[in-house]
Amino acid sequence: MATFPDNPVLVVGAGPVGLTAAHELARRGVSVRLVDAALGPARTSRAVAVHPRTLETFDQMGVAGPVLAAGRHNKAFTMYSAGRRLVRLQADYAAMPTRFPYTVVIEQTRTEELLREACAALGVRPEWGVRLTGLDQDEDGVRAQLTHPDGKLEDFRTPWLVGCDGGHSTVRGQLGLPLLGESSETWQLADAPVAMDLPPDTIYWAHADGHALMMVPYLREGYWRLLDTAPGPGAAAETPTEAAARFSAKLSAGLGRTVRVGEPSWTSVFTFQQRMVPNMSEGRVFVAGDAAHVHSPASGQGMNTGIQEAYNLAWKLAMVARGQAGRPLLATYSQERVPVGRALLGSTRKATFLVQFKNTLAPVMLPVVFSVVRKVPALRGKIQRKVLGGMSGLLRHYAGSPLTTPGGRLRPAAGSRAAAVAAGLPAGPAAEALYAELRDVRWTLLYAPDGGRASTTAADVAAGAGEWLSVRAVGGGAPGDGGGVPLTDPGGLLREALGFAAGGGGWALVRPDGYLAAGGDRLTARRLREALSVLGPVVLQRSSATSPAVSDTVVSTTRVLEGSR
């Protein structure tokens, strides 16, 4: 991938969100500068869960392998109340196919370390102790004032600035973006060794004496993340020994067995909030992650959502920065991600209520309710799918996005994850070929070669699109199908999964973040024009087909994209 040495994009904040943004910009050939006010990497971990959709994102980034190796794969959630086991819910992803049907439990510090290594391989390293202290912008760029550890002031000019600087975001404050919502509860986190006779093959929820605790097993033997939803007013002043004793007593009461908690390596008592910004960009400046929304840690969504936001923004910003798309493409960042943040606040609010379960009747209600759940498999399965669907990120889609063209016989529907298509296939060459294609930084046009109009259109598209589009002939091609590189599909399994006609015909357009943008049974000028028009006039000027139009509906790339001028 070619690189562009002009003034780099400035990413503020070198946590998991900023590292993802920097990695994806650099992977797409955009020069990046990454700064962080902290003097070095974080030593404590707020987030510990990497959910399936984030694992799919990491797979596209090329970093899934190290994350999988460094964490524990969790597939169950077990609930106790007053010493009695209520129910064990197993992971059920049948209705939302994924290559990663589990959550990986891994310290945020380790996730950040792996992302830093991936960024370093692309030539991007965080500048620690460099604080953003001011910014202003005009039509052509952003002037950022940076303060170095020695007090030196630097005026830095950048074409774009991405704020990934957390809940107390300086970028958000400089933009004057309001953080709307409400304050919420005070909870306590701790990482500690735990000795008990329950296996570390599940997340545990334990209710006792009117409040609840959670235990999440790390890969490190005997080491757990602990969460107390009612730590009490004196918890912040406790010594590690006192904190260990309190956790031991509460967990023993909730789980109905002796639990010995050792001294925590760290604890944090904090009051979380449920707030979000109404817009995630202002001119040439963007916010992502906790800089855009803060909420309860109950369902482990914060880091995951921020990583997916950074990925969403990075491919769009890279296309604009490289002259492959117009600025209207960047408006789709807020249009797509603000609704996700709004839905997230609602789901985490529900998760917070369920985790806390403060109702005074809980000791009576919980055994009764979950006795029914245990005895009714259909209800149990529905609850499992509902909980997993909300936490996993696999059900999120962009059906209403300006980048999504509804209609056609595409399976799954436009706006859905293309990875679900691969995950629904038997393990083998077709699935692996699609997974590999999703790691490409470009848009992908998949089509079924028919030796006729679709093949000619694909050839024109491939000739004129340039570096931003990968054109793939699913299952290879016949004579005259030179427009696309063959994509392995023995037996036609992928064609069938995409809804392509058995005898040829059918196409699907996949965005760089792996979501299906459009598709149908015939590759025509009108459909491609609709699907790609949001990229804007810059792309149209750069596209130049090498062959003329062959019919009113099958035309060269330039006319496909431009329509009638």
Image (cartoon, grey):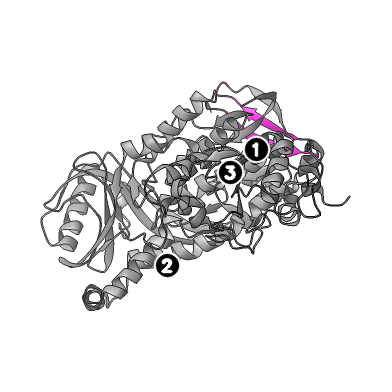
Residue 417 makes an appearance in the image: no
Q: Quadrant of residue 369?
A: bottom left
Q: Position of residue 214 (x, y in %)?
A: 28, 56
Q: Are marks 1 and 3 in contact (CB under 8 Å)?
A: no
Q: Position of residue 331 (x, y in %)?
A: 70, 51
> Mark 1, residues whose alpha carbon is within 10 Å: few (<14), some, or many (≥20)?
many
Q: Residue furthest front?
A: 479
**Amino acid under disc 1:** Gly
State the residue at coordinates (53%, 56%): 498
Could you say whether the residue bearing mark 2 is in a helix, strand or loop?
A: helix
Q: What residue is pinned by disc 3?
A: 473
Residue 201 makes an appearance in the image: yes
Q: Is residue 296 magenta?
A: no
- Tell me which segment is drawn in magenta: 130-150
**Amino acid under disc 3:** Ala
261 vs 267, left or right, is: left
Between marks 2 and 1 in the image, the one whose residue lies nearer the viewer: 1
| Circle on res. 482 | 1
Q: Position of residue 415 (x, y in %)?
A: 58, 58
Observer-nearest of 346 and 446: 446
Among the two numbered marks 2 and 1 on one chain, the one whose residue lies closer to the N terminus: 2
Q: Is residue 135 magenta?
A: yes
Observer-nearest of 211 and 546: 546
